[in-house]
Amino acid sequence: MNLPLPPVLVVDDEKNMRRSLETVLSDEGYSARLVESAEEAMECLAREEFFMVITDARLGGMSGYDLLKKLHGQKPDLPVLMLTAYATTKLGVEAIKAGAVDYLSKPFAPEELLHAVARCAERYRLLRENAALRSRADQAFSIEQIVGESARMRELRKLIQTVAQTDARVLILGESGTGKELVAGALHALSQRKDQNYVRINCAAIPETLLESELFGHERGAFTGAVRQKSGRVEEANGGTIFLDEIADMSKPLQAKLLRFLEDGSFTRVGGTQELRVNVRLLAATNRDIAAAIKEGQFREDLYHRLNVVQMNLPPLREREEDVVVLATHFLKLFQTSMNKNVRAISRAARQKLLAHHWPGNIRELRNAIERALILEKTGELQPSSLPDFQVEARLQRGQALQVSPDESLIDALARIERELITEALDQSNASLSRAAERLRVTRHALRYRMQRLNMVSDTAPLE
Ligand SMILES: Nc1ncnc2c1ncn2[C@@H]1O[C@H](COP(=O)(O)OP(=O)(O)OP(=O)(O)O)[C@@H](O)[C@H]1O
Ligand SMILES: [Mg+2]
C-alpha cells in the first residue's frame, strides 16, 4: 500500500524561519503549508489533513505550547515537533510533557529536523495502513449472504461449510457476477483462521509491475520509487487467508514465483535475498476459461494443479431460473431498507420479465436492475416498466456496426462490441490509455482491467 503523504504544517511568526523550513522540507520531497500563528494553524487543521505540525514555541498571540495542548486533546495522533529558541533542556522537556513528539533548539542542523520529520512520516504511514487493515477486517462475510434455493446453491453452501474448516486451497470458477468474492469471503469467515487477517488482491486491477512487490514486498532501493522496505501482503496474511482474485490475469513470471510460494510457503522480497516463510491459506478465483488459458500457454498447468485442490464452480444465473425471483426478492428487501422505500412485492408481470432475461452479468446484473427499479418505482409493487429494457441488445443489433452473426452468443457479441468501442477510443487517442479511458469515462485501471478480460493486452505489452 503506497499512501500519499499529506503536507507538514509549519507554524512560525518569523518569515525567514518559515522560508528556510520550507526549503529544507521541499528539498527532501515533503510539501509544506506555512502559517504565521497558532490561530491560523487551528483553522487549517480543521479543514485539511497534515501528517505533522512543526511549531515555534513562541508565537504572537496563542503560544506554541497552547497550540500543542489543544491539539493533544483534539488530534492525539498528530505528531507535533516543537522548535524552542533557547538551548535549555527544561523547555524541551516541558514540550514533551505537553505531548510533543520531539523538540529542536534553534539553531539546528537541517538533518536533525529531517530525521524527526522522517520518523513522523513513517508513523503516519503505519497508522493509516493499520486503519485500512481494520476497515477491511470489519467487512463481515457470512454464508447467509449467499442466497439461492436451487439444488446447486444448496450443494454449494454445503461444500463451503465442509471445505472451510480445512486448510485446502480452493479455486473458485464462474462467470462474472456469480458470487466468487462472496464465496471466498464465506470460506474465510467459516474457517479456523477467521480471527486472523483476510487479505484480498485483485491481480487484474494492480499494474503487473507492482503486483510482485504488492504480493511479496520489496527491499529498499529494489526499484525507482522503492524508498523504503515494504513487507508484502502475504506477510500481512500470515496466519490467515489470502484471496487472489482474477488469478488468470497474473503474468507468467509471477506465476512461477507464486508456484514456488505454494510449494513450500517461501518467497523473497523484490530486490532481496533472504528467504522468508509464512503460513497462509490460499483461495483463488477467475472468471476466465482457465482450461483455455492453459491451452493457449497463458496459464501454467503446474500452477493450476497446485491451486485446484478443491474446485468450486459457480453456476450462471440463467442455469438456475428458480433463483431469479428468490434473489430479486432478497435484493428488494435489502434496498428497501437502505432507500427507505415501501415497495412490498414484485408484480407478476415484473417477475415474468425477470425470468425471460438471460442475465449475462449474472447476480450483479440482477442486483443492479433491482436497485435501479426501486429508485424508479412509484407504486407499492415493482412494475415491469421500472425494470431495465432488456431488449436493448436486440435494438442494438439493428445498428449497422452491431450485426451479430447467427453462431455468435450474446456474451461473445457484447465482448466483440466492447472490444470495438475500446479499439476505436484507443485509435482516437493515439493509443494513450489514459486519454482513451477519459473518452470512455472510466478510470485508466478499469479500462486496462476490461482490456485484459477481453484479451486485448498481452502480458508483456506496455500500456501507458
Ligand atoms: N448467491 C448470492 N446471493 C446474494 N448476492 C449475491 C450472490 N452472488 C453474488 N451476489 C452479489 O452479486 C454481486 C457480484 O458478486 P461477486 O462480486 O462475488 O461476483 P464475482 O463472481 O466476483 O464477479 P467478477 O468475476 O465480475 O469479479 C455482489 O454484489 C454480490 O454480493
Ligand atoms: Mg470478483
Image (cartoon, rainbow, N blue to C red):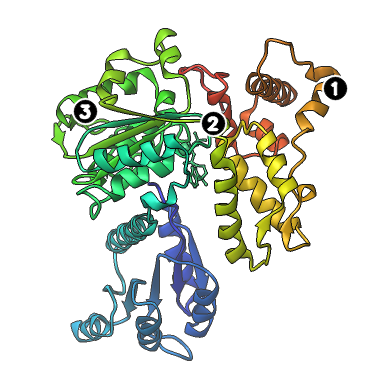
Measured Cα–Cα span from mark 2 to mark 1: 27 Å
Q: Left or right: 165 with respect to 285?
A: left
Say which element carries label 2.
helix
The residue singled out by tag 2 in the image is 449
Q: Left or right: 10 with respect to 276?
A: right
Query: In the image shown, does 354 or 115 lie closer to the viewer?
Result: 354
Residue 20 in view, yes or no: no
Q: Left or right: 83 with respect to 368?
A: left
Q: Position of residue 14 (x, y in %)?
A: 47, 77
Q: Which disc is residue 459 wearing?
A: none
The residue singled out by tag 3 in the image is 261
Q: Position of residue 179 (x, y in %)?
A: 47, 40
The residue singled out by tag 1 in the image is 399
- From the Cβ of disc 3, is ligand 2 less than 8 Å away? no
Query: In the image shown, does 143 or 218 lie closer to the viewer?
Result: 143
- From the Cβ of disc 1, is ligand 1 less than 8 Å away? no
Q: Left or right: 26 with respect to 87?
A: right
